[in-house]
Image (cartoon, rainbow, N blue to C red):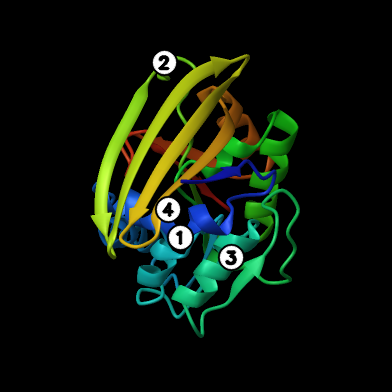
Amino acid sequence: MTTTDARPADGYTGAIARVYDLVHQGKGKDYAREAADLADLVTGRVPGADSLLDVACGTGLHLAYLTGRFTRAEGLELSPDMLAAARHRNPGTTVHHGDMRDFALDTTYSAVTCMFSSIGHMADQSELDAAVASFAAHTAPGGVVVVEPWWFPDTFTPGYVGAAVVEAEGKTISRVSHSRLEDDATRIDVHYLVAEPGRGIEHLSESHRITLFPRSAYELAFERAGLGTEFLPGGPSGRGLFLGTRP
């Protein structure tokens, strides 16, 4: 059995990037439906919206479906391995390498999105402010910013254990996660066992610290960025969506 410890500061190792989508799709995450709902939300608020930037686009699965809904759909990703996967999945689509806190693309979009609670990787209010300000700076007047938050302090369940077994692409993958409270954040430890005929079993692990920002912290960041703010309950993961409008 091979053991790979995946705890990079800027994202996922290539090994985990390869099984990431298989696991989440196997657990029932419907990227096509989520992308369609997101596109409908954007075009409903910004009639004629023709461009979108998906920040922290990961392996580019949402982006793959969004490209069919907008004349110009692009991604931005910090993790080199996720970036490589996104570019491979979306040939001909621009996927930028950048940090959500300080990227500068010298262009604007009808919408800037940040999904799958990636915003929770901001360490504190100053980083949250910087990220939302970057989103706003890349949003055209009249455009929207859509952010899927992490759990709020009063909705997080300490000690939660998640488990899934997925069979895909000739692999059997088991994923077990444990979430605990660590100061003002969630510490999530995740372990994968990836079994493949003729190749044995590989053990992968990752650990993430995701900040438990209260709803007011997000609203403050949107206000400081000059965005009108609305919170929409539900969303693709049940954590809701923040929608900010640039005047």
Label 2 sits on residue: 159
The answer to whether residue 121 is seen in the rendering is yes
Q: Quadrant of residue 127?
A: top right
- Distance of mark 3 from mark 1, alpha carbons? 12 Å
Kindly state the secondary structure of the residue where label 3 is placed. helix
Residue name at image x 63 percent, y 14 percent: 183
Q: Is residue 38 above or below residue 184?
A: below
Name the secondary structure under disc 1. Answer: helix
Distance in Å between CA atoms under marks 1 and 4: 6 Å
Residue 191 in the image, given as x and y percentages of width and height? 45, 36
Q: Which mark is residue 20?
A: 4
How much space separates mark 2 and mark 1, taking CA atoms?
Answer: 27 Å
**Residue 160 left/right relative to 189:** left
Residue 107: % across, % down: 68, 72
> Which marked residue is nearer to the observer: mark 3 or mark 4?
4
Kindly indicate whether the residue at mark 4 contacts the one at mark 3 (C-beta within 8 angstroms): no
Type of the residue with mark 2: Gly
Report the residue marked by disc 1: 18
Vertical side of 118 occupied by 80: above or below: below
Q: Say left or right for 39 vs 108.
A: left
Q: CA distance from mark 2 to mark 3?
A: 31 Å
- Tag 1: residue type? Arg
